Amino acid sequence: MSVREAIAIVGLGCRFAGGASDGAGFWRLLAEARDAVVPIPAGRWNHAAWVGNDAGQTAQAAGGFLPDIDMFDAAFFGIAPREAVQMDPQQRLVLEVAWEALENAGIAPDRLRGVQGGVYLGLYNDNYGMIGRGSPDAALIDGWSASGTHTSVAPGRIAFQLGLTGPAIAVDTACSSSLTAVHLAVQALRAGDCATALAGGVHLILSPLGLVASSKLGAASSSGRCKAFDRDADGFVHGEGCGVLVLKRLADAEAAGDRVLAVIRGTAVNQDGRSAGLTAPNGPAQEAVIRAALSNARLAPDSIDAIEAHGTGTALGDPIEMHALASVFAGRRKPLSVGSVKTNIGHTEAAAGVAGLIKAVLMLRHQTVPASLHFKQLNPHIDLGGVPIEVPTATSAAELSRIG
């Protein structure tokens, strides 16, 4: 084993807005350049009362929402109905998607008992609340309330359901949670902590309070669309989603005859440290983590064909991210495509990173770069310094070998 050992993605499962209930559906959404943002579904909350500019209100009346999040086949997983009712829907959703990811990998989920498999899951929304179903009525607390709502239980429940004996870790690093989960899974596979790993993230919006907070922060788009890197970008729109990858060491995957969807050559993590503010990104830190990932993968900047960016569409974040990319990829001659899946499905927060990673895997599989939506003219605060970075405005075939 090596600290630089290649890691194979051998299966994936996902649920994103716009009918993307699996990888094939997600690819259709991307290839057809569809916008999955819809009005807030009836039944979530009385959104008309929450939309506005007053205190306690939000500018957003739309998002990338999933349908039927109240539906769950508890009997399939051997979970009692009374326990299922107390389970945060995020636990239900990620359990289903993890199962589907294993099926996509050709691995029988019911044959993993005792396997040294790891689960690394990004999530942080505690919408359901410690008191059952978000109700303030303490009489609704029962024996399942704690296990149904603690974030740590989500990966633990997957490990329990499958009988896995490796690490089961919940990860909260805000919007990078699911990519940090993938990074930790890659490290664990390289270190021998597990032989197979499930890694990803999940995010649902069961309360309007997060929308209010992002509006007051000035990060939410009043137009209800994420226009990453565009002159008219005014913030992000919220989204829901879940994505899970099945990972193995490449040598093990090849020995087992697994279908390899893509290969992770290198990963890296860091922190901004001091910046203009707690929520403000740090350009030099972004440059450093990109360079570290390239170094870990033993890849030169010129070898990268496309970048799936964070691309939130915020006035502060977009220029800082693009300037970091321009610095790292300065001197290249061939164009570098930079897009953001948030323009299709919204900002899925704890699942945002894995959404972008799954998009990258599908781009490689189909040798196609999908359009990044809502882009017309580059933000005037972005100076690329002559670096040939392009935001794709139409879906096009491409010869892709490596995506960052």
Image (cartoon, grey):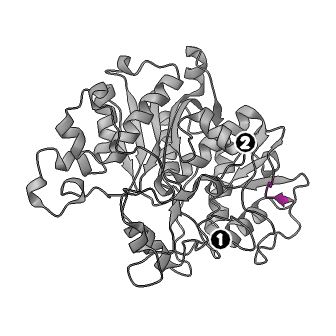
Helix, strand or loop at mark 2: helix
Q: Earlier in the sequence, mark 1 or mark 2?
A: 2
Residue 91: x, y in percent?
33, 43
- Residue at coordinates 56% horizontally, 64% vertically from top-left? 237
Q: Nearer the viewer, residue 193 or 13?
A: 13
Q: Is residue 367 above or below residue 56?
A: above
- Residue at coordinates 72% horizontally, 36% vertically from top-left? 364
Residue 228: x, y in percent?
68, 64
Q: Amino acid at mark 2?
A: Ala
Q: Is residue 187 left or right of residue 344?
A: left
Q: Is residue 24 left or right of residue 376?
A: left
The secondary structure that most of the magenta stretch takes on is: loop
Residue 274: x, y in percent?
52, 77
Q: Which residue is mark 1?
A: 283
Q: Amino acid at mark 1?
A: Gly
Q: Which residue is mark 2?
A: 31
Q: Is residue 313 above or below residue 171?
A: below
Q: Residue 256's quadrant in the figure?
A: top right
The answer to if 390 sits in the magenta stretch is yes
Neighbours of disc 2 within 10 Å: few (<14), some (14-19), many (20+): some
Q: Is residue 353 left or right of residue 333?
A: left
* Magenta stretch in the rendered image: 389-393
Neighbours of disc 1 within 10 Å: few (<14), some (14-19), many (20+): some
